[in-house]
Amino acid sequence: MSGVLLTDRYMSPMTESDLDEVAAIEKLAYEFPWSRGNFGDSLRNGYFGVCLRHVTGTLIGYCVLMPVVDEMHLLNLCVAPQAQGAGAGLALLREAVRITHAEKLEGLLLEVRPSNHRAIRLYERFGFASIGRRKNYYPARHRGREDAIVMRLSFATEGEDGAA
């Protein structure tokens, strides 16, 4: 994946040199953020990291993808709070799907907080379906723990799943 120009923004692979900016946005966007070390570990383990930048060079979002057997797991997708609502999340999701297809994987899996209505709407509009729930998956300040909705976007074509 090389830098791809998208009108006023572009995507590029996440590298170690991006991690300070990534961690700073993560802290702004989430009550329980990943650490800089979590992102570094992901890159060192061969996961796919993608950065979305404005043409000025300002980081506006990123995602981290982990290939698992026959599908991709979207571990983290985040848009800087000041850039939300302008299509950055959709652009990152499209790139996650593109990478998943390029890796010839059958689908894209993710977890999302039930309280994250904006993200759920984005995923549903994109074609993700809810396939389950992970109990007490996320830390939550006032509720102890919060469940996760597990969602999947399947790329299986007709007949590939064993159906006649």
Image: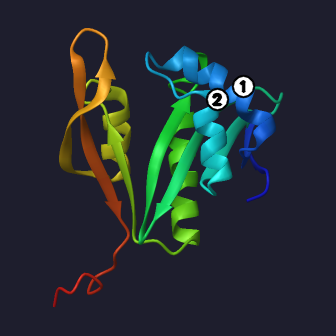
State which mark lies toward you, 2 or 1.
2
Q: Secondary structure at mark 1?
A: helix
Residue sitting at x 40%, y 71%: 106
The local crowd at label 1, few if under 14, some if 14 to 19, many if 20 or more residues have their Cα within 10 Å, is some
Query: Which of disc 1 and disc 2 is earlier in sequence?
Result: 1
In this rendering, the answer to whether 112 lies above or below 44 is above
Kind of residue at badge 2: Arg
Q: Measured from the top left, where is residue 7 in percent x and y?
A: 73, 41
Mark count: 2
Front-most of 122 and 68? 68
Identify the residue under disc 2: 36
Q: Measured from the top left, where is residue 84 in percent x and y?
A: 53, 24
Q: Quadrant of the N terminus?
A: bottom right
Residue sitting at x 57%, y 24%: 26
Q: Is residue 140 left or right of residue 27?
A: left
Residue sitting at x 33%, y 36%: 112
Q: Does residue 65 show up?
A: yes
Mark 2–mark 1 Cα distance, whole angstroms, equals: 9 Å
In this rendering, the answer to whether 145 lies above or below 45 is above
Residue sitting at x 26%, y 46%: 150
> Furthest residue to the top?
142
Q: Is residue 126 left or right of residue 5?
A: left
Q: Quadrant of the C terminus?
A: bottom left
Kind of residue at badge 1: Glu
Identify the residue under disc 1: 21
Q: Secondary structure at mark 2?
A: helix
Q: Measured from the top left, where is residue 18 in percent x and y?
A: 76, 34
Q: Quadrant of residue 45?
A: bottom right
